[in-house]
């Protein structure tokens, strides 16, 4: 085993809190979470409960009011160490983070220009190929379907081959083939000892998760999911 | 750095896809601006031709002064066009510099007697500097009036007869002939009989230069109407993603600004080429300015590049602020038109109320006009250039502030 393979990767979230409107709207309260390598964690909750906020804080886009996010016991910041941050976290937001007037290839170039990975190689035999991006490489983003955009967004977020992938409702309003492609890719990504944090409402994606958390009234609670969706629904109501 | 350069390139490439449409729309704006200036210029010409205010400076007891004024006022060619006002020299100069009057005629002591005696003291006409249209108008009017006066009117002779009788001179018949000849002789060389002077005024550039520069400046601003699609903000998700990869807001804005300036340069180069061809074909140049030949046009175009920096920054600021294509278009159009009006693009600033003039001087368009005019007339452009740089930095600072406030609100 190489030294890199011996390291046990771990993401820790300790006492995280986030509020809006000068503290009037408390969205996240004392969030504690641990994610280990090779794990896929699902975060479920009603619309507007704060799932996207949690992922944004973990990604480094939003600053928490209190609490810490640690990677292998150390803090990380996209502002101070963008390169290191990109090595750790890949974030795929709900909205499309692409330049609409350019092709998929141009968009990929922006994120891969400084990457240790070769874009061409990844397209031919790597995860970009697995996501089916070569099929629409020269298509303008504005002419793409929702599924194509989502796959391309994942491809862009993976430019530095990060250890943690934060996905905000990746399968929302996608067709079955797209969902299947993304699922296959996520399974492979997990198999490579990486961590996935998934905010979702989709049953297929929930089945992909090793652990489930429910975010309700700003509090993150673990939920023992036994594969029965009705139990889960009853928990929400 | 690599990603920064790549982002500039991709922004530029993205904007380039809109360039054909922009060039086409820019041409429409050229015609629009030209149309506005034709209307304003024609309006101004009509106004000028309707009424010219003339200050007359002469001794209080100058003989025949009222007779001369009433004579000129009643002439068919000048009737309803000239207004005479008797003034002290200092007051006349003040009013001329403030453009309350268009010209001063300084009548020397005993002017008519000097003509009669043949010593012929010079009449002085004093104009505000750069009043080219008034100069040509007045000289033609006065020449015609003087000719009419000398050739068609016998009133002068009657007045002379009266003068001879009053002082009891005897050789009236002989002198009458000689004086008539003298009159005709002086009329024939009228251009040498009138001395022309210019005094410094508040806006000392010719109106035609002012209109040319104003049109160019307005065009550079109104181009922004065609950039709406390419300058509306990128999605928040994209901005955030760039931040995660080390491109902060400042770098994002800088990259976008550089890319936009590059696109603007291409558009500008096309316009300069078109203007050059049009001027060469029509052979219309502005003598005594930098735009006197094709080489001058090229120099002027290069020297005007800092102006492009400010217009680029301002346009970017507008679209960043409104975050919406239609809102940006409306805001840009009305703000430019209002600033243009306040800073004297459509009418000479001196004609506007003092308060409006003071506001106008604070606008970026005023700085750009002053910069363009000083370049055109070989004056020092340092002061307006400083203003341009200051405004450009201000625009980018505002964009940063807007993004910062939005981000803070979101967070």
Image: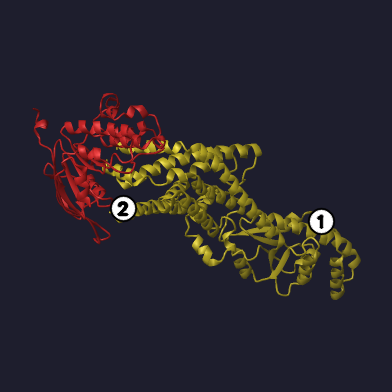
Chain colours: A red, B yellow
Q: How many marks?
A: 2
Quadrant assignment, res B2:
top left
Residue at image mark 1: B185
Q: Nearer the viewer, residue B34 or B358?
A: B34
Q: Is residue B27 left or right of residue B386?
A: right
Chain at tag 2:
B
Under tag 1, what secondary structure? Answer: helix
Q: Is residue A110 left or right of residue A226?
A: right
Residue B158 visible in image: yes
Quadrant assignment, res B144:
bottom right
Under tag 2, what secondary structure? Answer: helix
Q: Which residue reaches farthest right?
A: B173
Q: Is residue B144 above or below residue B158?
A: above
The residue located at (28%, 52%) in the rendering is: A48
- In the rendered image, residue A31, in percent from the top left (x then y), is placed at 16, 51
Tell me the CA gap for discs 1 and 2: 82 Å
Q: Is residue B27 above or below residue B71?
A: above
- In the rendered image, residue A149, in percent from the top left (x then y), is placed at 34, 36
Residue at image mark 2: B407
Residue A80 visible in image: no
Q: Quadrant of the N terminus of chain A?
A: top left
Which numbered circle lies on residue A225? none
Q: Earlier in the sequence, mark 1 or mark 2?
A: 1
Q: Nearer the viewer, residue B31 or A175?
A: A175
The residue located at (54%, 42%) in the rendering is: B25
Q: Is residue B155 above or below residue A108?
A: below
Q: Is residue B403 left or right of residue B15?
A: left
Q: Nearer the viewer, residue A30 or B410?
A: A30
Q: Nearer the viewer, residue B354 or B157?
A: B354
The residue located at (31%, 34%) in the rendering is: A176
């Amino acid at each position: 085993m190489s030294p890199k393979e011996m390291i046990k990767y771990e993401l820790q979230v300790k006492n995280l809190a986030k509020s809006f409107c000068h503290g009037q709207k408390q969205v996240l309260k004392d969030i504690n979470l641990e994610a280990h390598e090779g794990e896929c964690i699902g975060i479920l909750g009603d619309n507007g409960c704060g799932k996207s906020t949690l992922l944004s804080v973990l990604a480094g886009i939003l600053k928490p009011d209190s609490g810490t996010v640690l990677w292998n016991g150390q803090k990380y910041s996209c502002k101070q160490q963008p390169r290191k941050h990109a090595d750790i976290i890949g974030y795929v937001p709900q909205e499309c983070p692409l330049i609409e007037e350019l092709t998929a290839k141009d968009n990929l170039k922006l994120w891969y220009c400084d990457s240790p990975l070769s874009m061409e190689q990844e397209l031919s035999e790597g995860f970009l190929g697995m996501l089916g991006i070569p099929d629409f490489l020269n298509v303008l983003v504005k002419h793409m379907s929702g599924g194509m955009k989502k796959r391309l967004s994942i491809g862009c977020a993976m430019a530095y081959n990060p250890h943690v992938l934060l996905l905000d409702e990746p399968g929302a309003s996608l067709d079955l083939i797209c969902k299947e492609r993304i699922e296959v890719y996520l399974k492979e990504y997990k198999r490579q000892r990486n961590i996935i944090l998934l905010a979702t409402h989709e049953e297929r994606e929930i089945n992909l998760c090793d652990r489930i958390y429910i975010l309700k009234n700003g509090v993150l609670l673990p939920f023992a999911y036994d594969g029965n969706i009705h139990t889960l629904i009853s928990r929400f109501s | 750095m690599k990603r920064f350069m790549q982002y500039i390139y991709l922004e530029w490439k993205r904007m380039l896809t809109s360039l054909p449409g922009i060039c086409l729309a820019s041409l429409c704006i050229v015609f629009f601006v030209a149309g506005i200036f034709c209307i304003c210029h024609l309006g101004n010409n009509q106004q000028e031709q309707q009424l010219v205010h003339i200050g007359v400076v002469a001794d209080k007891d100058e003989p025949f002064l009222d007779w001369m004024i009433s004579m000129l006022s009643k002439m068919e060619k000048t009737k309803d066009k000239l207004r005479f006002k008797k003034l002290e020299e200092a007051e006349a100069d003040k009013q001329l510099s403030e453009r309350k009057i268009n010209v001063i005629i300084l009548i020397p002591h005993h002017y008519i007697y000097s003509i009669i005696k043949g010593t012929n003291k010079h009449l002085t006409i004093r104009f505000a500097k750069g009043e080219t249209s008034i100069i040509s108008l007045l000289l033609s009017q006065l020449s015609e009036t003087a000719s009419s006066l000398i050739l068609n009117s016998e009133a002068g002779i009657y007045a002379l007869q009266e003068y001879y009788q009053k002082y009891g001179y005897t050789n009236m018949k002989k002198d009458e002939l000689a004086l008539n000849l003298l009159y005709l002789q002086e009329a024939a060389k009228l251009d040498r009989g009138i001395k022309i002077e210019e005094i410094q005024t508040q806006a000392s550039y010719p109106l035609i230069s002012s209109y040319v520069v104003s049109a160019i400046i307005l065009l550079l601003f109104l181009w922004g109407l065609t950039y709406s699609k390419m300058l509306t903000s990128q999605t928040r998700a994209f901005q955030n993603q760039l931040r995660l990869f080390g491109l902060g807001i400042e770098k994002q804005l800088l990259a976008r600004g550089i890319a936009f300036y590059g696109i603007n340069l291409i558009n500008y180069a096309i316009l300069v080429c078109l203007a050059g061809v049009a001027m060469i074909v029509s052979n219309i140049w502005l003598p005594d300015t930098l735009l006197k030949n094709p080489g001058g046009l090229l120099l002027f175009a290069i020297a005007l590049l800092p102006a492009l920096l400010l217009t680029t920054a301002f346009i970017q600021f507008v679209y960043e602020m409104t975050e919406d294509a239609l809102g940006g278009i409306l805001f840009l159009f009305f703000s430019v038109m209002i600033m243009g009006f306040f800073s004297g693009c459509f009418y000479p600033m001196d004609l506007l109320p003092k308060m409006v003039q003071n506001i106008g001087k604070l606008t970026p368009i005023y700085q750009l006009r002053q910069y363009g005019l000083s370049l055109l007339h070989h004056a020092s452009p340092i002061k307006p250039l400083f203003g341009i740089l200051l405004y450009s930095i201000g625009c980018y600072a505002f964009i940063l502030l807007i993004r910062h406030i939005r981000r803070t609100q979101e967070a």
